[in-house]
């Protein structure tokens, strides 16, 4: 699989996961988004940093253990 293929697979998985909650529980998704709107910029940045680091760690784990 080429890097382009992997990127498209990753994007597809992102869209699938992002779509599950609004598809299955739209009210819960809306409430979650309203709570997110109440967060400060610093809190949102921290959550973004956690997601970024978690994604990088997951990529490293996949890379090292798939060989």
Image (cartoon, rainbow, N blue to C red):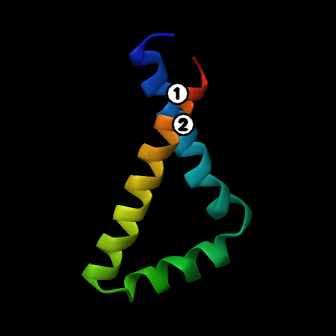
Q: In x, y percent, where is residue 18?
A: 55, 53
Number of marks: 2
Q: Identify which residue, 53 or 64, lies in the foreground.
A: 64
* Left or right, residue 40 beside residue 64: left
In the figure, 7 relative to 41: above or below? above
Number of other residues with Cα within 10 Å of mark 1, as a class: few under 14, some 14 to 19, many 20 or more: few
Per the image, label 1 sits on a secondary structure element best described as: helix
- Residue in the image at 39% along x and 89% along y: 38
At 54% from the left and 36% from the top, the residue drawn is 61
Q: Is residue 3 above or below residue 29?
A: above
User: Could you tell me how far apart the alpha carbons at marks 1 and 2 are, in whole angstroms?
Assistant: 5 Å
Q: Residue furthest top?
A: 1
Quadrant position of the C terminus in the picture: top right
Q: Tell me which residue sits at (36%, 64%) in the image.
A: 48
Residue situated in front as seen by the camera: 62 or 27 = 62
Q: Secondary structure at mark 2?
A: helix
Q: Give x and y (percent) for residue 32.
A: 55, 79
Name the side, left or right, on which 66 lies relative to 51: right
Image coords of residue 26 (percent x, y): 65, 70
Taking depth in this image into account, of 5 and 45 the one nearest to the observer is 45
Viewer-proximal residue, 56 or 26?
A: 56
Q: Are marks 1 and 2 in contact (CB under 8 Å)?
A: yes
Residue under label 2: 61
Residue 64: x and y, percent?
52, 27
Residue 6 is marked as none
Figure check: 57 above or below 9: below
Taking the spot 53% from the left edge, 44% from the top edge, the residue there is: 15
Residue furthest to the right in view is: 24
Position of residue 38 in the picture relative to residue 35 (left or right): left
> Badge 2: few (under 14), some or many (20 or more) residues near its Cα, within 10 Å?
few
Q: Which mark is residue 64?
A: 1
């Amino acid at each position: 699989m080429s890097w382009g293929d992997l990127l498209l697979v990753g994007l597809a998985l992102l869209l699938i996961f992002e779509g599950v909650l609004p598809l299955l529980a739209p009210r819960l998704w809306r409430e979650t988004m309203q709570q997110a709107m109440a967060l400060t910029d610093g809190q949102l940045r921290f959550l973004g940093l956690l997601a970024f680091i978690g994604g990088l760690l997951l990529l490293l784990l996949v890379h090292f253990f798939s060989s």
